[in-house]
Amino acid sequence: MTARKIIKVLIVDDSAVVREVLRDILSGDPEIEVMGTAADPFVAAEKMKLEIPDVILLDVEMPRMDGITFLQKIMSQHPIPVVICSSLTDRGSETTLKALESGAVEIISKPRIGAREFIAESKGTILDTVKAAAGARIKKISLKIHEVQPKLSADVIIAKSASKAMVQTTEKVVVVGASTGGTEALRVFLEAMPENAPGIVIVQHMPEGFTRAFAQRLDSLCRIAVKEAADNDTVIRGRALIAPGNHHLLLKRSGARYYVEVREGPLVCRHRPSVDVLFRSAARYGGKNVVAVIMTGMGDDGSRGMRELKDAGARTIAQDEATSIVFGMPNEAIKTGAVDHVLPLDSIAREVVRLALS
């Protein structure tokens, strides 16, 4: 049996505490080696002259050179998977979104001193993100660490319906799940949507404090309206609702009206918001009226929900491997046998509109 390749990680952050905590988290996994840490990009560049990392964990705000400038230099000279580590301040949201546009593959939350529950919840996500980033397709352009928390299912948020989905109506709803690489994939998907597109509800794995700026940016680019979802928002034609970071988003129905519920709760599939939660609620309240899409992302969040949607009569689509930054989520959904169509990213919007009209 061929030995699994060890992932070499370089941590770049001006906080000594953060560097120490991240080192402790990563070094505890046998598949990861922390090849070094650096307090700023200049020190990081010197280390990279001696050894090239497989993944870089990069802070945004640092002395001497900011993280985005360093990221842009990396992507233009020697593309390496970069994961942005942020303290999640509102002030930094647009800056971090710019980092994603500049080639970063993902955002993870920066551990905070004393936030033991936060670190316990985030450990599994940090490790999964680094492993997913190591396999991403990149284009040239001492705190006590708790055990990883159990991987919960959507049952903890919404019970699986024992009855068949409702009869089909004329109004369709589109539900979308995405993670690593999803910020760019969603931009391509939503920019291709016509003004009268069916109502869209989205879960993108993204921390609290970033989804509002992300939605506002998409709103400025797209023909349809895009907003961060608020509790009881109606799902209407020509608008996409994006789950707020750190909250689950459910599709509900009252009579002929579809609306969303924003709900707190534990991590599901190690995520909050969770694609499985959205998809299960869509299977329960939308059934045959739903077109579901699962896009690029690590892990298997959404695969069980996609199966439930298919069983409820929904039409289902997965992004193909060639256009996915990480093929984890689409691939896991495909394995369940619940996916009707596997399509390249630039074909998904057209197929969604066709299915919604059929």
Image (tube, grey):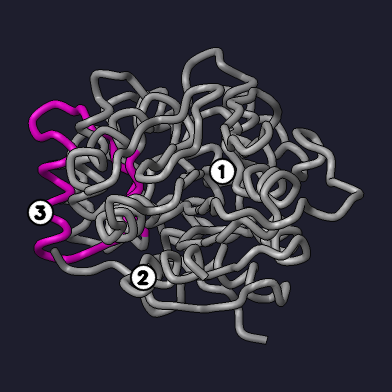
Q: Name above or below for residue 250 compared with residue 48.
A: above
State which tag comes first along the sequence, 2 or 3: 3
Label 1, secondary structure: give it.
helix
| Distance between mark 2 and mark 3 Cα atoms | 35 Å
Q: Name above or below for residue 317 compared with residue 246.
A: below
Q: Which residue is mark 2?
A: 350
Q: Is residue 216 shown left or right of residue 295?
A: left
Say what amino acid the circle numbered 3 marks: Lys
Q: Mark 2 and 1 residues: CB-CB less than 8 Å, in contact?
A: no
Of residues 228 and 271, the one drawn nearer to the viewer in this rendering:
228
Q: Is residue 312 shown left or right of residue 23?
A: right
Identify the residue at the far top of this view.
Answer: 114
Of residues 268 and 293, the one drawn nearer to the viewer in this rendering:
293
Q: Which residue is mark 3?
A: 73
Q: Residue at x 58, y 72 (%)?
A: 331
Say what amino acid the circle numbered 1 marks: Thr
Q: Which residues are magenta?
A: 55-84
Q: Residue at x 41, y 27 (%)?
A: 18
- Residue 325 inside the magenta-drawn segment: no
Of residues 205 and 61, the one drawn nearer to the viewer in this rendering:
205
Residue 37, position in %: x, y? 33, 41
Q: Is residue 275 shown left or right of residue 311?
A: left
Q: Quadrant of residue 125?
A: top right
Q: Residues within 10 Å of mark 1 (few under 14, many from 20)?
A: many
Q: Which residue is mark 1?
A: 125
| Distance between mark 2 and mark 1 Cα atoms | 33 Å
